[in-house]
Amino acid sequence: MPKSKPLVEDNGEVRELSLRDMQHMQTAKKALPTSLQAKLRSRGPQKAPTKERVTIRLSPEVVQPFRQTGAGWQSRLDAALKDWLRSHKPASASR
């Protein structure tokens, strides 16, 4: 079996693919391990979104302690706000 030609030229540029190259290509499903395939699958749209995307400005004294806890800090901040709402009532805006 002849050795395949590298896809990258000596100057670092990707060479033009030939028909023979194309015939030897595999789909990602065949070429990638199943563990990586699972990571690349998208979740798809939510049937009923459980959270609402909003933009909010918070002081660094509030955000930093939650960010320092690592991944999932936004969910923990959400939980802290829910906990606060159990014992407090938000003030009405006065006009």
Image: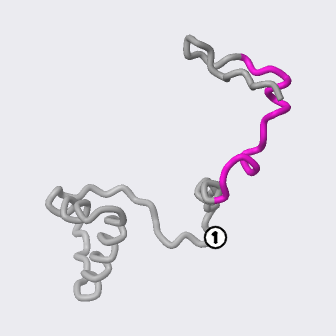
Q: Measuring 23% from the left and 84% from the top, which residue is drawn there? A: 88
Q: Position of residue 25 (x, y in %)?
A: 78, 36
Depicted 92 relative to depicted 69: above or below: below
Is residue 80 within the magenta segment? no
> Most extreme residue toward the front, as rendered?
1
Quadrant containing the N terminus in the rendered view: top right
Q: Quadrant of residue 44?
A: bottom right
Instruction: Indicate whether residue 22 is drawn in magenta.
Output: yes
The residue tagged 1 is: 47
Q: Residue at x 33, y 77 (%)?
A: 79
Tell me the crowding category of disc 1: few under 14, some 14 to 19, or many 20 or more residues within 10 angstroms, Cα based.
few
Name the residue nearer the viewer: 67 or 78: 67
Q: Nearer the viewer, residue 46 or 94?
A: 46
x then y, percent, for residue 37:
65, 55
Residue 20, compared with residue 94, is above or below; it is: above
Residue extent of the magenta highlight = 16-34
Q: Tell me which corner region of the image, top left, top right, bottom left or bottom right, holds residue 82.
A: bottom left
**Disc 1 element:** loop
Quick check: 41 above or below 95? above
**Residue at (17, 56) in percent of width and height:** 60
Q: Quadrant of residue 59?
A: bottom left
